[in-house]
Image (tube, grey):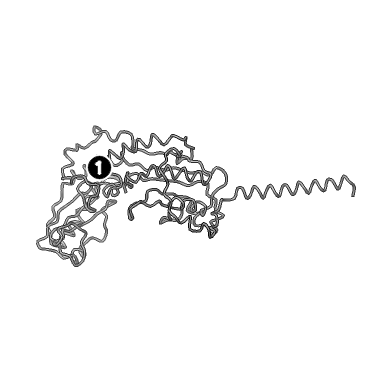
Amino acid sequence: MSTLQLSLAIIGGLVLALIVAYNTWTSRRNAPKRALPQDSEHAAEPALRQEPGFDAAAAVPSGEFHGLDRGPDPSTHAVDEGDTLQLPVPPFSSERRPGLDPLIDVIASLQPEHVVSGDAALAALPPTRRAGSKPFAIEGLNEATQQWETPAPGQRYQSFQAGVQLANRMGALNEIEFSEFVVKAQAFADAINAAPDFPDMLQEVARARELDQFASDHDAQLMFMLRARQAAWSPGYVQQNAARLGFVPGAMPGRLVLPASTQGLPPLLTLGFDTQAALADDPDQSAIRDITLSLDVAQVHRTEQPFARLRDVAAALCQAMDGVLCDQNGTPLPAMAMDPIAGDLELLYDQLDGRDLSAGSVLARRLFS
């Protein structure tokens, strides 16, 4: 073999080796990032819940929302509030009693001829607890405690009331749903030998439309997108980084939640990613290029500072996972785009407080659901 042939063979081998090395490097660089193994020294560290701080200077987020401008204009209402809001409204309290409330429910009194046992009341309840798309409920006045409650076995009740919610995110109570409410309540009244007293349908439907208009103008659900700058993420990698900030698995695959400080309340924030990636046979090979962070404003009390938490969580995840914060359409957001939204949210909170529907309260959680 001549010197030229030998040189060409060596050069060819080197080029081939470089191509193989480049392809291997590119493949590893573009492979989804995986969760790091936990050694004995740091095994317990990710399990610890680390609450993010409230340093707004470290945040770079923003999002889209609606209904946070100046609230509803009373002149645009088709219904006169003075004519429709006739039922008494209890004084404001941050902790209202769960159950029927005249602020957001149509309530009909049911007065039986005699005291009714809880077992008899339970047997007479309708099989479904909805009238159309609206929650329906029946409560009894406990003879011993003198408190309204859902009928329970072994108790005795001297009076009852039936109620249907005026509005929710499905819309306002309409005439058909009101009629279904009357039919259900009347059947229960007949079963326990009670005399019902129903409010005027037209007045209640008008009141429902006014409440629904207010709710529509003050319903804010914020959503942001975190997009990978370069390499995609595996589900385990997302979960590991989110767990360091206090997130726990949600009820559905591909959903993580940041719990509220009080057990049983709705989560502060929700983190979501592709469900199919979460259910894949080999999740480590699933490539996730973006995740969402969302906040349902009306479901979380303002004292939890959920918006500040969202900003801190977004900034922390972007830094740890090499991501960029975007709006829900995938457009990158400027650093200070969130500040005006924070001011609008404070105005929204004040407007909800003024209507006795404070964010995170029992009534607000029912209305905005």
Q: Give the x, y percent position of residue 221.
A: 37, 43
Q: Residues within 10 Å of mark 1 (few under 14, many from 20)?
A: many
Outermost residue, front direction? 41
Horizontal arrangement in the rendering, residue 349 relative to residue 25 (left or right): left
Instruction: Look at the picture and state if 338 lies above or below 121.
Output: above
Q: Is 71 in front, or is 21? A: 21
Q: Residue furthest right?
A: 2
Camera sees residue 180: no
Q: Position of residue 260 (x, y in %)?
A: 36, 51
User: In the image, is residue 257 above or below residue 344?
Assistant: below
Q: Position of residue 212 (x, y in %)?
A: 27, 42
Q: Nearer the viewer, residue 10 or 200?
A: 10
Residue on which disc 1 sits: 211
Residue 1 in percent (x, y) is at 89, 50
Indicate left or right for 254 with 105 as reference: right
Amino acid type assigned to the residue bearing label 1 in the image? Leu
Q: Is residue 174 left or right of residue 326?
A: left
Is 3 positioned to the left or the right of 296 in the image? right
**Residue in the image at 40% along x and 56% along y:** 251
